Image (spheres, rainbow, N blue to C red):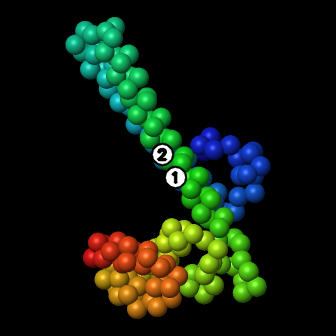
Amino acid sequence: MTIDIIDLSDPAYSDLSAVQLSMVRVAQGKKNDILAKADSEIEELLFLLLRNDNARSSVKEREEARIRAQAEADVEIVREDLLHQLAYESLGTEGNDNGPYRYPENPNYNLSYSQRFLVVRNYYMEAVSEPNARLQAYAMDSLARTYLGEFYQTLYDLLASYC
């Protein structure tokens, strides 16, 4: 697989961990799927226009441009998501005297409340697979109340929506 969703020779990405490289490979796979789907749609459009004797019409050019623009927009969304995931994953590599930051063993109080929200949400999404048990475990988490502040209720509502 050729990786071209991000430039891995860029110094910011040259020392990615195995988890981060896995994220890059998944994102590259999504990009490849998006582009393959766009190519397939363009091919179907051409066959449709050929069947109707309109292969040289301006419709082909407009529709092809629209399909390619949509594909590029979708790829950009995947790329941005990957960059956010990589940035978020790198937050977990830091730590303090108590070891690496990890909720709930060693929470990182240097994070903004929105970043704390993501940390706690990911913790519960990975730790408990059953939605009702996840919500109950979160409701009993007293650390989350102080760690998340006003975001506690937001996460509670989100987890409740999965039930």
Q: Quadrant of the C terminus?
A: bottom left
> Label 2 belongs to which residue?
77
> Label 1 belongs to which residue?
81
Q: Which amino acid lies under the numbered mark 2 shown in the image of this protein?
A: Ile
Q: Is residue 117 visible?
A: yes
Is there CB contact under 8 Å for labels 2 and 1?
yes
Q: Is residue 29 visible?
A: no
Q: Which quarter of the figure has residue 65? A: top left
Q: Secondary structure at mark 1?
A: helix
Identify which residue, 68 or 18, lies in the foreground.
Answer: 68
Q: Give the crowd class for mark 2: few <14, some 14-19, many >=20 residues within 10 Å.
A: few
Q: Which amino acid lies under the numbered mark 1 shown in the image of this protein?
A: Asp
Q: Secondary structure at mark 2?
A: helix
Identify which residue, 84 or 2, lies in the foreground.
Answer: 84
Q: Name the residue rendered at 71%, 72% in the picture.
A: 94
Q: Give the crowd class for mark 1: few <14, some 14-19, many >=20 residues within 10 Å.
A: few
Q: Name the residue rendered at 51%, 67% in the picture.
A: 114
Q: Which quarter of the figure has residue 84? A: bottom right
Q: Which quarter of the figure has residue 63? A: top left
